[in-house]
Image (cartoon, coloured by chain):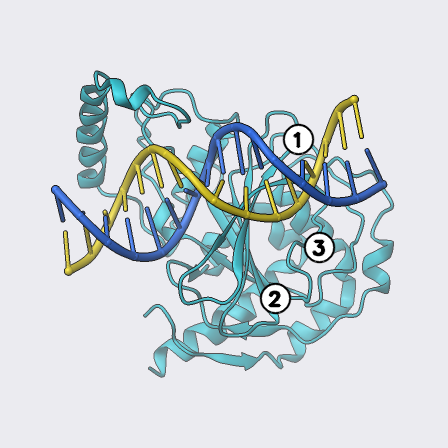
Chain colours: A cyan, B yellow, C blue
Amino acid sequence: MANMGFSGEITSAATTAAAEASEGDKWDSFLNLLGAGVHQDFVAPALFDSYPPLILEDILHEQDTNQKLLPSPPFSAVPESSECLNNNPPETPNSSSISSLSNEEAANDEQQTKADEEQDEDPDKTRKLLKPKKNQKKERVPRFAFMTKSEIDHLDDGYRWRKYGQKAVKNCPFPRSYYRCTGGGCGVKKRVERSSEDTTVVVTTYEGRHTHPCPITSRGSIGFAQQQVVQPHMYSPLENLTTTTTSSFDSWFPSLGQHGLLQDIVVADQVMRQAEEQM
DNA sequence: CGGATTTGACCCGCGC
DNA sequence: GCGCGGGTCAAATCCG
């Protein structure tokens, strides 16, 4: 089901109206929500070529709530991220279309922990770089992805990012870039790649959540107001990504609906569902 | 000169 | 066990 090959334009009047209504406010809200939930003023970059973006969520990285005894996270966003992982934050216990991990998986985690401990004795492992292995089982960080139609790969979302890698991706003519947030110990990662199916589409994947306010100071949403709003497009979901449903998206960003952006997501979700049903 | 980017090497997980 | 592909590191380089 990886690629449904669906590609069409959303022509919903509601969507268009919503988009024209107060795109600045909604984007502002959206971007704020990507952060720590702290109020952030976002300088509209005029780079977001499409509004709204199609939002995707990586369900492969969900995790059960029982987050047992995970050692220190790689970065401080963790308590919060644990909540998000199962898309079922405490405030909105309504279940999403994405299920929580099973006990089985929890058991696997346990086994893995044991295996990791055994590896501690391997001297080779203490070599060079290295990631936290040992008891530090791989942290499952919540991911959040969305597509935008833009000629520019790295969209300015108001945060400061440092590029730490670039890799060629198999079956894709465009390289994937890796960025890390430079905000004080934040550690949020961002992956940017251009879709091979539609080269005008940029897929941005956030990993983790910002633990600090957006560093860029206020110039409000002026840029948004001047920004050209184009018809939103729908693109087939990438492999390992699935379109988020309204409910799961809402549980990620509960306050989003209050700002109207959710309407657009709803439309996108409905169209995607219809496409799935027709298959 | 300090911070950001580039890029080759390395590590790790996964599938065969 | 091995090869492949994705992700990360860090030295070199670039740039303001």
Give the mark, 2 or 1, whose residue is nearer the N terminus.
1
The residue at the point 17 percent across, 30 percent down is A111
Which of the two discs, 2 and 1, sits closer to the camera?
1
Three-letter amino acid code at the position of disc 1: Gly
**Residue A164, x across and y down, in percent:** 56, 40
Mark 1 lies on a secondary structure that is: loop
Which residue is more in the foreground, B15 or C13?
C13
Q: Which residue is mark 3?
A: A27
Q: Which residue is mark 2?
A: A264
To the question of a shared chain for discs 2 and 1, the answer is yes
**Residue C7, x across and y down, in percent:** 43, 43
Quadrant for residue A103, please give it: top left
Mark 3 lies on a secondary structure that is: helix
The residue at the point 18 percent across, 34 percent down is A107
Which of the two discs, 3 and 1, sits closer to the camera?
1
Q: Which residue is mark 1?
A: A183
Q: Chain of mark 2?
A: A
Which residue is more in the foreground, A225 or A175?
A175
Q: Is residue A258 above or below residue A133?
A: below
Mark 2 lies on a secondary structure that is: helix
The residue at the point 74 percent across, 39 percent down is A40
Do the residues bearing badges 3 and 2 touch, measured as CB atoms within 8 Å?
Answer: no
Whether residue A89 can be seen here? no
Describe residue A50's horizontal placement relative to residue A67 as left or right: right
Describe residue A123's horizontal placement relative to residue A33 as left or right: left
Give the mark, 3 or 2, whose residue is nearer the N terminus.
3
Three-letter amino acid code at the position of disc 3: Trp
Which of the two discs, 3 and 2, sits closer to the camera?
3
Quadrant holding the N terminus of chain A: bottom left
